[in-house]
Image (spheres, grey):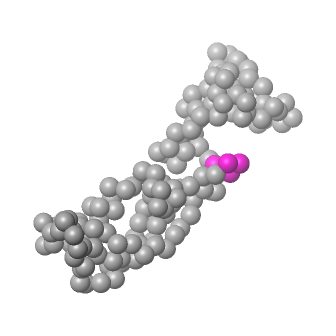
Amino acid sequence: MEGLSVADADLVVYLHPSKSSKVSQAILRELSSSLFKFNEAFGGVLLAYDVNILDKQAKILSGVHPYFGVRLKANLLLFSPKSDMLLEGKVVKLSQESIHVIILGFSSAIITAENIRREFKYKTKDNEELFASRSHKRHVIKF
């Protein structure tokens, strides 16, 4: 599916000194808090990660905050769709003005009437709403 990509990243995770006894657990918790959220630095939504800690020694940040930074290398699975990409999803609602879908089981999207291809015509058949293709009789979008 388009929109999914794997990226290798060199990261620095900043941890509070109270987490120094369980650094690995703190790193995983910090990365887990970024799952299924758009991250500007990654340029997409983080779906999964695999982490390798590079340094066993952390660097203490100078200044007011007593946090320490741990360098790590991570493989990231990102979801970053762009315009005109082909995505797969499940239709959850249909109306004459829009098609509502869930993509990858977590991301909702709406296709408005002006973005639905002209070859599709809205129909109500046996109390069921659907968009049917004018050129391919078996090609339908329904809930």
Q: Is residue 94 above or below residue 70?
A: above
Q: Quadrant of the C terminus?
A: top right
Looking at the image, the residue that sits furthest to the right is 135
Q: Is residue 64 above or below residue 89?
A: below
Asked if residue 140 can be seen in this view, the reply is no
Which region is colored magenta? 83-87
Q: Tell me: 31 left or right of 106.
A: left
Which sits in the foreground, 10 or 2? 10
Looking at the image, the residue that sits furthest to the front is 63
Q: Quadrant of the N terminus?
A: bottom right
Report the magenta stretch's main SS: loop
Q: Could you tell me residue 140's position as x and y percent? A: 73, 33
Q: Could you tell me residue 111's position as x and y percent? A: 64, 34
Residue at image x 45%, y 55%?
39
Q: Could you tell me residue 4's position as x and y percent? A: 57, 59
Confirm whether the magenta stretch covers residue 106. Answer: no
